[in-house]
Image (cartoon, helix red, strand yellow):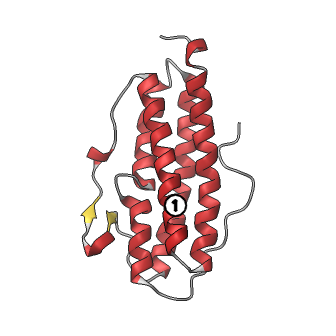
Amino acid sequence: MNYQIKEPYPKINIQKKSRYVANLLSHVYASNEGELTAVHLYIYQSLVLKDCYPQVGEALKKIGEVEMHHLFLLGEAIEQLGNPPIYADCNFNLESYWNANYVYYDQDLKTILEIDIESESQAIHNYQLILMTVEDEEVQKLIKRIILDEQLHLKIFQDFYRQLITIDDC
């Protein structure tokens, strides 16, 4: 199974510094709805599901790895835009530092999939808002590419959710 689309990621080559754009990206980078949260959420979920639901656990692990790559690319973009890539949501000139309370620590498969479907839907929405706000073509290319992966992740989670009645409980 593929956990990212085959299209390559654009090279991050931002020429014009913008703290405003960097602050916007910080939300999808390290907020409660950002990539840093997704990495921790999916790795946690993969660990708690791996024994009872190995296929779901493996998918979550692989999706977490893709989200980690998104985190790295967004960090590069934030740095090139002129901000340090700290683990904080810097919107509205307030730094809200990331913390582990952002992770939902559920262990029920149905609840996990519902959380993941909502998380991916929200991520896509947040990225689309950035596309409507940011004019920098380099940032737009990156965001458009990341959205494609997020749409794939959403489909994977929706497919698992639809299969819930055929997945055996431990």
Report the residue marked by disc 1. 127
Pick whichever, 67 or 159, lies toward us. 159
Pick whichever, 126 or 57, lies toward us. 126
Residue closest to the far front: 132
SS label for mark 1? helix
Residue closest to the far right: 6
Q: Residue at x 44, y 84 (%)?
A: 18
Q: Is residue 125 above or below residue 2?
A: below
Percent from the top left, x then y, of residue 54? 56, 23
Q: Residue at x 53, y 29 (%)?
A: 57
Pick whichever, 88 or 124, lies toward us. 124
Percent from the top left, x then y, of residue 82? 42, 83
Tally of marks: 1
- Other-residue count near label 1 (Cα within 10 Å), few / some / many at <14 / 14–19 / ≥20: many
Pick whichever, 84 or 139, lies toward us. 139
Left or right: 9 in relation to 161: right
- Identity of the amino acid at label 1? Tyr
Q: Quadrant of residue 166?
A: top right
Percent from the top left, x then y, of residue 129? 49, 64
